[in-house]
Image (cartoon, helix red, strand yellow):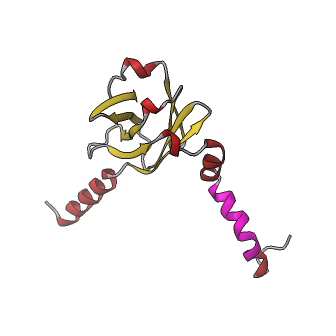
Amino acid sequence: MNPTVSIAVILTVLQAAHCQMIRDLSACLLGQSLRVDCRYENKTSDPLTYEFSLTKDNRKHIIQSTISVSENVYRNRANVTMHKNLVCLYLHSFTTSDEGVYMCELKATNDYTGNQIKNITVIKDKLEKCAGFSLLIQNTSWLLLLLSLPLLQAVDFVSL
């Protein structure tokens, strides 16, 4: 095989090897519901599959999934929403019996390198309320802009 072709094939495989990567997994309380935010970086237009699970008492419980079958006990209490680079699990009527290690597992269709997985331990008494917590995360770019305005004004880059 031609060395140039070999390098091109290796680079193509390396580019396809990481089609998505979980950047952050966080949890908060939204009223009586648990919300788990799984933020990811997607480098492909291929559809994304997901699985949210809970491990407690050394047993894995599938809450919501497009990869495998969800357990009956969670089907009526859970739903998932997908936004740009964000998959959110909502578990309604969250109680201390739902505490444990929550896992977000993502896989892009036609990505043969394996699934991306991230875990977070959720304890009800230690959870933040979603309002301020998620607003800060969702609007980080606006927050940075607001914090940098005095500095930009100081160097006469921006005049208000």
Give x and y (percent) for residue 152: 74, 75
Q: Is residue 90 depicted above or below 24 in this figure?
A: above
> What stretch of residues is rendered in magenta?
140-152
Residue 118 horizontal side relative to residue 127, left or right: left
Relative to 96, say whether 40 is above or below: below
Name the one closer to the observer, 26 or 123.
123
Q: In the rendered view, would you say 95 is above or below 21? A: above
Residue shown at the point (35%, 37%) measured from the top left: 109
- Across and down, in percent, residue 143 comes to 68, 60
The location of residue 52, given as percent across then percent down, is: 40, 34
Closer-to-camera residue (17/107)? 107
Horizontal arrangement in the rendering, residue 56 relative to residue 136 (left or right): left
Residue 149 on the magenta segment: yes
**What residue occupies the far left of the structure in this picture?**
1
Q: How many labels does the image show?
A: 0
Quadrant in which residue 32 is drawn: top right
**Residue at left offset 70%, top offset 67%:** 147
Q: Would residue 21 be counted in the magenta stretch?
A: no
Indicate the quadrant containing the N terminus: top left, top right, bottom left or bottom right. Answer: bottom left
* Res 104 visible: yes
Whether residue 85 is visible here, answered yes or no, is: no
